[in-house]
Image (cartoon, rainbow, N blue to C red):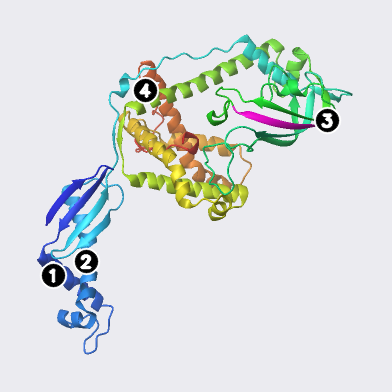
Amino acid sequence: MNIQTEPQENHTLRLVVEVPAERLEVAKANAAKKLANRLKIPGFRQGKAPYNVITKYLGEATILEEAVELLSNEIYGQVIQELDIKTYGPGSVENISYDPLTFVYSVSLQPEVELGDYRAVRVPYEPPTVSDEDVENVFKTLQRQHAQVEAREGAAEEGDRLTADIHAVFVDGDELAEGAERNAEKVYRGDPFFHQHNAKIDLNLENKPILPGFAAAMLGVQVGETREFDLNIPNDEGFAEKIRGRTVHFEVTAKAVEKVVLPTLDDEFAAKLTQDEGSPLTMEQLRERVRLNMEAQSAEDYDKSYGERVFEQIMAQARVKYPPRMVEARIDEMLRDTEERFKRDYRLDLNEYYKITGTNQDSMREQMRADAEAWVVRSLVMSELVEREQIKLYMHEVDAVLDASVARMNVSVKDRRRFKGEQRANVANYLLMNRVMFHLVALGRGASLPVLNTSEAPTPDPVVAEGEVRQTPSDE
């Protein structure tokens, strides 16, 4: 066979294969025999008619069509094997021409990832400290959670608890024209910011509920009174980037105002909070426990964000090639997830959503494309890193987490078994990602890379092998 390979820019390969005439003749004979087995030709037993009779009975075009179909799959597999092409999924026939018979195939290639000198990546490691003020804020929250309330006569004062109907909308930005297609990345004038009936808000000027200025705007309000005012969303990371600096109009109707009586932070309060323990704690002991828990949580949160920053630098220097099919497959998955969520939360399928929003599947796919591409790159780099670093997870580790979970469940043995089967992949991925982040923290700090503990009689093969890591929707 005459074979030409033409690499394409999108990490696919174009194969042009010219088929020898004698091979086509053999294929036509096989095709005729295959077709004859399905027919009853007068004067012959089924499948026993000679080639010329079958051709006359069915026509040369029918025989040729069947032969070409048989050859297209056969030749594709042979060429892929002979040239040792690493494919991603099945190929497709782009074109078929005759005289001579020539197939043109499009082949998606396996993705390629070059991490570069990723072990040289360094990121400053500056974990935050837990201050006395941080600890005090926790106790202020505990005070309010265990506070006593009593109805207040007259106007609301600072520290009171307000029950209100709150409706807030954006009053700046572009207005969505009637019949125009909504851009999911934009927030339009008139879009809701906050809407809740009987919302309970503590009028604490220091904590700044909802938005800075809200508590101050509601001081002095009386039951039944409605107030309207505008507030600006701060330009900080506490809010989505697309709404930072935007102006919101509030309409708030007071339903109830209550005076909040806070408990004293003493040993009696500490004992009340820890009364279910064998030995209730004093306030000093409780403060120490709270501090230690906060320090542990702060360190865990910082390490996660730090590991993510290290990984982002590794991604930035990585060279990744992948075929478009990977992105399309991810978009397919995102569409299925979206439809399932719509059906579950809104009892709405995607076709109904398209009608309501004036969109269609093509436009939704395009909206998802950037996220899908980012997900593919992230997954490929993560998988390559896991493989290069030989990070593994063993069956006994996953089972230990699942066993601990089901031990707390008051359900039947059958339900426990089903739960373990359904959650095994999720737990495995979660544990592996934690292990990867632990690895990245050590890498970014320039510390010795951790030696993983696999001494507990591991299974011969890891439950999650290197390179099989998968990113979740929260990472998309």
Judged left or right of residue 153, residue 171 is left
Residue 213 shows in the view: yes
Mark closest to the chain's N terminus, 2 or 1: 1
Q: CB of mark 2 within 8 Å of CB of mark 1?
A: no
Q: Main secondary structure of the magenta part?
A: strand
* Residue 232 spot, x, y in % from top left: 64, 25
Residue 275 shows in the view: no
Mark closest to the chain's N terminus, 3 or 2: 2
Name the residue nearer the viewer: 233 or 158.
233
- Circle 1: residue type: Glu
Judged left or right of residue 159, residue 239 is left
Looking at the image, is 70 positioned above or below residue 106?
below
* Residue 402 spot, x, y in % from top left: 52, 38
Residue at image mark 2: 68
Mark closest to the chain's N terminus, 3 or 1: 1
Q: CB of mark 3 within 8 Å of CB of mark 2?
A: no
Q: How far separated are the C-alphas under marks 3 and 1?
A: 91 Å
Residue at image mark 4: 451
Q: Secondary structure at mark 4?
A: loop
Q: How far separated are the C-alphas under marks 1 and 4?
A: 62 Å
Camera-near label (3 vs 2) is 3
Mark closest to the chain's N terminus, 4 or 2: 2
Please provide the residue range marked out in magenta: 246-254
Residue at image mark 1: 25
Name the residue nearer the viewer: 39 or 152.
152
Quarter holding residue 152: top right
Mark closest to the chain's N terminus, 1 or 4: 1
Q: Who's the residue at 37% across and 38% down the image?
A: 468
Q: How far separated are the C-alphas under marks 2 and 1?
A: 10 Å
Judged left or right of residue 20, residue 429 is right
- Circle 4: residue type: Val
